[in-house]
Amino acid sequence: MRIAIFGAGGAGGYFGGRLALAGGDVVFLARGAHLAALRRDGMVLDGPDGERRIAALAATDDPAAVGPVDVVLLAVKTWQVAPAVGALAPLLGPETFVVPLQNGVETAAQLVAALGAERVVGGVCGTVSWVAEPGRIRSLGEVHFVRFGELDGRASGRCARLVEEFRRAGLRAEVPADIEVASWEKFLFVVPVGGVGAVTRMPIGIVRALPETRRLLAGAMREIFELGRARGVALADGAVERSLGFVDALAAEATSSLQRDLAAGRRSELEAWSGAVVRLGRAAGARVQIHEVLYGALLPLELAARGELNATPV
């Protein structure tokens, strides 16, 4: 399969880099200093098991230079999805499909509205990876996975082929029984971890170890569980406990992308994480009090990062 990685940040860089290392037909859509480094020096995957360099890879900022591909892995931030969709046309052939890898539960519907249902396959990924410097993707721990599935739940050859591409690269990949449930399970995990981590400004090892912050984390997960159920998502009993187990498996020094972005004064995915929980919770009549507090506490940092609030954190 010819795969375009649209967005070569933490997730796109890590998974695309692993596919390229395995000899996959991969092209990266990137920009700025990161793109310049990829073109000049290739990519370095920097993880617990050392460095792996991909000396030669295809990278560009021009979709027209790539042409039609079999699949687009959309790995930009949630707030970059709309402009990215507007740039996808040159990548789309008759059978091309697009897989969103954002942390959130609304991007697939956004893509369906823009591209049509047949163009979109649901996607979920998990990795603690980020751009440490241009051309270098740093990862923590060994928890890296991808899940792909048709939005209507049917089995399909294209999902099976994509999973096989990832497995050939030595990555954990599967087609879950229900990709919507899988997306909400990830949402239930990442949003509390991001919000509590950003508010406390502590890595996950501290957050999960202190009884007070662990209870806060579990309570935030429970709110998303109840919200998902209220919206008709078939989240299984024990989802919160399994998510806490996933938290316990993370490297102690791990932080979420939202936490790292806000700490660095960058725009984050707050609106698609805690903000979405608050908005969807109000629409469903669900109690999301912990997320209202997390969202309210972090919103000034987000607005300042976006240049919508003339203030400097103290």
Image (cartoon, rainbow, N blue to C red):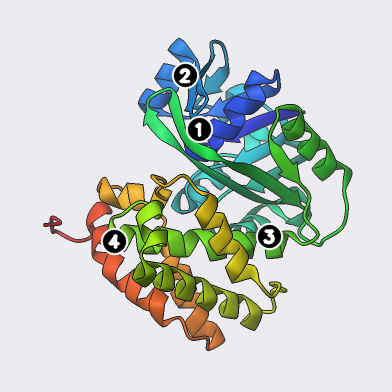
Assess whether mark 1 and mark 3 are in contact (beta carbons under 8 angstroms). no
Residue 116: where, in percent of width, then height? Answer: 72, 55
Q: Quadrant of the C terminus?
A: bottom left
**Residue found farthest to the bottom:** 285
Pointer 2 and pointer 4: residues touching (CB < 8 Å)?
A: no
Q: Earlier in the sequence, mark 2 or mark 4?
A: 2
Task: Tell whether label 2 touches label 3 (CB within 8 Å).
Answer: no
- Residue shown at the point (27%, 69%) measured from the top left: 297
- Badge 3 marks a residue whose secondary structure is helix
- At mark 1, the secondary structure is loop
Earlier sequence position, callout 1 versus callout 2: 1
Which label belongs to residue 38?
Answer: 2
The secondary structure type at the circle numbered 4 is helix
Residue 207 appears at what percent x and percent y?
A: 37, 60
Q: CA distance from mark 3 to mark 2?
A: 32 Å
Answer with mark 3 or mark 1, whichever residue precedes in sequence: 1
Q: Badge 3 local density, few (<14 within 10 Å), some, or many (20+)?
A: many
Q: Residue at x 50, y 58 (%)?
A: 190
Q: Is 156 situated above or below 300?
A: above
Compared to residue 312, the image places residue 129 above or below, namely above
In this orientation, which residue lies closer to the viewer: 57 or 206? 206
Distance, label 2 to label 4, CA atoms, is 35 Å
Report the residue marked by disc 3: 182
The span from disc 3 to disc 4 (Cα, nearest Å) is 27 Å
Q: Amino acid at mark 1?
A: Ala
Quadrant location of the N terminus in the rendered image: top right
Picture quadrant of residue 165:
top right
Mark nearest the camera among 3 and 2 is 3
Label placed on residue 8: 1
Q: Position of residue 11 (x, y in %)?
A: 53, 39
- Quick one: label 3 or label 4, which is nearer the N terminus? 3
